[in-house]
């Protein structure tokens, strides 16, 4: 008989365990806050998508415009693209063709002469250069339905920055985000403080389904999905019309709720392990007697 286990308190194990448990609880609560915020965001998104498609001039022609209130409004746009000042948004991904880029082109709106950036959609990596993109620069005047988006800025000081742009600097053709304030430095005319995403479907249901979806975040970050091998084949898919309209998707609120339980479970698991580590094996009297007889 090897003996039994008895609880023996350890400051070291308890302190480390407490820190890890508190960290897990904080992360769980953080995800809960994100869940509640995402629920409110989705309610607002649904409300704005319920509104009918209107000409963009009706929304931006007012004297005082609250740009944030226009987020995710569907608008009808007619204008002329300025392909000379076109650029790309890099590190994008498509469910069919895999990694690629989004094509961002300034548009002069018919009627009021305002200029706005338009995300025309996805193209594969193999045709991302300015020379290759010329094959997608068709026609002069275009009419389409689009979704209003706000300017994109780094989420934290740890986020990578785009190259500096502006007078005396080389043209920046590839950007990480549509940061209008920075992009404006290399555009010779005034841009509106919002941009557009061209969409293929105009109904509220189609747009909402494309916007809010589970994007398999971990796989998307590391390109571990089933489309990993669909990278720069050198050929365009003949069944698709490029650029393919693309959305900046929104992670559903249920994803954050799942993380709430994941972190709570991790905290519970750490507590169980810490308690288990503080149970020490104690030799029984019989084993001690036998050990003495052996001596």
Image: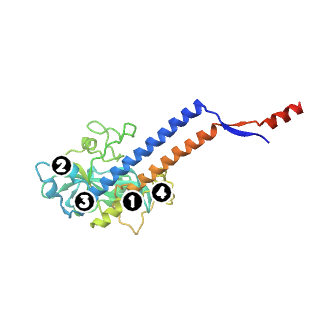
Q: CA distance from mark 2 to mark 3?
A: 17 Å
Label 4 residue SS: loop
- Local crowd size for mark 4, using a 10 Å CA cut-off: few (<14), some (14–19), many (≥20): some
- Local crowd size for mark 2, using a 10 Å CA cut-off: few (<14), some (14–19), many (≥20): few
**Residue, far bottom:** 239
Nearer the observer, 229 or 149 = 149
| N-terminal label among 2 and 4 | 2
Residue under numbered circle 4: 231
Q: Position of residue 29 (x, y in %)?
A: 41, 45
Residue at the image point whose x is 40% and y is 37% from the top: 158
Dot label at residue 47:
3
- CB of mark 4 within 8 Å of CB of mark 3? no
Nearer the observer, 35 or 174 = 35
Q: Position of residue 45 (x, y in %)?
A: 28, 57
| N-terminal label among 4 and 1 | 1
Q: CA distance from mark 2 to mark 4?
A: 41 Å
Residue under numbered circle 2: 66
């Amino acid at each position: 008989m090897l003996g039994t286990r008895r609880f023996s308190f350890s400051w070291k194990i308890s302190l480390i365990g407490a820190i890890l448990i508190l960290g897990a609880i904080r992360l769980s609560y953080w995800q809960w806050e994100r869940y509640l915020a995402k629920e409110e965001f989705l309610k607002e998104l649904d409300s704005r998508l319920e509104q009918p498609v209107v000409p963009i001039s009706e929304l931006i022609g007012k004297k005082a415009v609250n740009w944030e209130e226009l987020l995710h409004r569907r608008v009808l746009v007619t204008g002329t693209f300025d392909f000379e000042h076109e650029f790309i948004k890099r590190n994008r991904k498509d469910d069919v063709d895999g990694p690629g880029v989004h094509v961002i082109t300034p548009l002069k709106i018919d009627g009021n002469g305002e200029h706005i950036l338009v995300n025309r959609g996805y193209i594969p990596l193999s045709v991302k250069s300015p020379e290759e993109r010329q094959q997608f620069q068709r026609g002069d005047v275009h009419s389409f339905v689009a979704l209003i988006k706000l300017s994109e800025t780094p989420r934290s000081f740890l986020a990578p920055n785009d190259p500096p742009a502006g007078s005396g600097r080389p043209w920046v053709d590839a950007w990480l985000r549509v940061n209008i304030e920075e992009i404006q430095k290399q555009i010779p005319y005034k841009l509106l403080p919002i941009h557009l995403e061209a969409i293929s479907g105009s109904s509220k249901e189609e747009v909402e389904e494309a916007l809010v979806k589970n994007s398999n975040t971990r796989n998307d970050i590391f390109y571990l999905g089933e489309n990993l091998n669909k990278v720069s084949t050198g050929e365009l898919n003949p069944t698709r019309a490029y650029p393919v309209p693309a959305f900046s998707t929104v992670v559903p609120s249920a994803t954050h709720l799942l993380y709430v339980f994941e972190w709570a479970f991790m905290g519970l698991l750490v507590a169980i392990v810490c308690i288990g580590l503080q149970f020490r094996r104690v030799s029984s009297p019989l084993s001690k007697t036998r050990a003495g007889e052996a001596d």
